[in-house]
Image: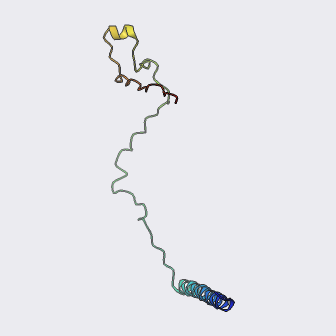
Amino acid sequence: MNPDDRKRAYRLDMLLACALVASGLAVSGFSLAQLNASDPQMAQATQPLQSTPGAETKPPAPPEPTTTGARPGEVPPQPARPDDEAQKAGATPALPPAPAEKTAPPIQQK
C-alpha cells in the first residue's frame, strides 16, 4: 500500500468516525430537548393506605411471641453416631454409614 492510499484510508476512517460522533450527539441532543419539552407526569405505584371498614371494632392482633435465641437446656443435643454401648442398647444412628474410602495401588516408578 503506497502512502497516498494510506492517507486516503486514514482520512476516510476519520470522516466516518466524526460522522458517527456527530450523529450520536445529535440524537442525544434531540432526546434531551424532548425530555425538557414534555410535561413530566408521575405515576403512583401503590394506592394510599386506607383503614379497613370496621377496624375500630376488631380486636387487635396478638403480639408476636418473643424468643430468647438460646437453646432449651432440658434437651441435650444428640450425636449423629451413638457410641458402641448405645448401639448395643438399641440406638440407631441418625446418618447412614459413610462409604469406604477408595484407594488405588501405589504408582510404580519407571
Residue furthest front in the image? 110
Which residue shows up at 38% across the image and 43% down it?
Answer: 61
Apparent side of residue 29 relative to residue 94 in the rendered image (left or right):
right
Instruction: Find residue 23 and report its image quarter.
Output: bottom right
The residue depicted at 39 percent of the width and 57 percent of the height is 51
Kindly identify the residue that appears in the image at 69 percent across and 89 percent down.
3
When asked about the image quadrant of residue 102, the answer is: top left
Give the image location of residue 76, x and y in percent.
44, 18
Above or below, 9 relative to 83: below
The answer to which quarter of the image holds residue 99 is top left
Residue 86 vs 24, above or below: the answer is above
Of residues 25 and 55, the one drawn nearer to the viewer in this rendering:
25
Q: The N terminus is located in which quarter?
A: bottom right
| Residue at 39%, 40% in the rendered image | 62
Towards the viewer: 2 or 15? 2
Vertical position of residue 44 compared to residue 77: above or below: below
Colouring used for the render = rainbow
47 or 86: which is nearer to us? 86
Residues 104 and 65: in front is 104
From this view, report whether residue 31 is shown above or below residue 82: below
Q: Position of residue 32 (x, y in %)?
A: 57, 83
Q: Position of residue 59 (x, y in %)?
A: 36, 44
x and y, in percent, of residue 35 in the image: 54, 83
Total numbered circles: 0
